[in-house]
Image (cartoon, grey):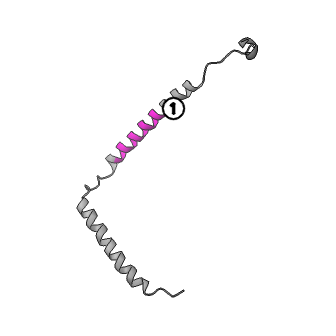
Amino acid sequence: MSEEIDGGVETAAPIWPVFGDLMSVLLGAFVLIHNLFMSALEQLLPSPPPLAPLDLASAVLINVAIALVLFQLLDRFKRPA
């Protein structure tokens, strides 16, 4: 009965494993290109200063304080609607 349903058409090999192999090769190539690019940038550019969390936190707090004061001052110049 299955021969009647198939109509004599032979089944071809699935193509998805080929795409899987292609994707793994492309991913490997992109990772290699990325690593080469990043290592070239590390050689060309100076390294950034180390992150100092206390300096970052104090800068954020100072900016917030200045923003709050400036908002209150500039809000006084707002025209009434």
The magenta stretch spans residue 40: yes
| Residue 39 rendering spot, x and y as whole percentages | 35, 43
Q: Which range of residues does the magenta coloring cover?
A: 26-41
Q: Nearer the viewer, residue 69 or 29?
A: 69
Secondary structure state at the residue bearing disc 1: helix
The magenta stretch spans residue 34: yes
| Residue 62 rendering spot, x and y as whole percentages | 29, 72
Q: What predominant SS class does the magenta segment belong to?
A: helix
- Give the position of the C terminus as an image quadrant: bottom right
Q: Is residue 17 left or right of residue 46?
A: right
Residue 38 vertical position relative to residue 12 in the rendered view, above or below:
below
Q: Name the residue: 72% across, 16% down.
A: 9
Q: Name the residue: 25% across, 59% down.
A: 53
| Residue 17 rendering spot, x and y as whole percentages | 54, 24
Q: Nearer the viewer, residue 62 or 44?
A: 62
Q: Is residue 49 left or right of residue 69?
A: left
Quarter location, residue 28 = top left
Residue extending furthest toward the front: 1
Reading the image, the residue beneath label 1 is 23
Residue 7 vertical position relative to residue 43 in the rendered view, above or below:
above
Q: Amino acid at mark 1?
A: Met
Q: Name the residue: 23% across, 62% down.
A: 54
- Give the position of the N terminus as an image quadrant: top right
Label tally: 1
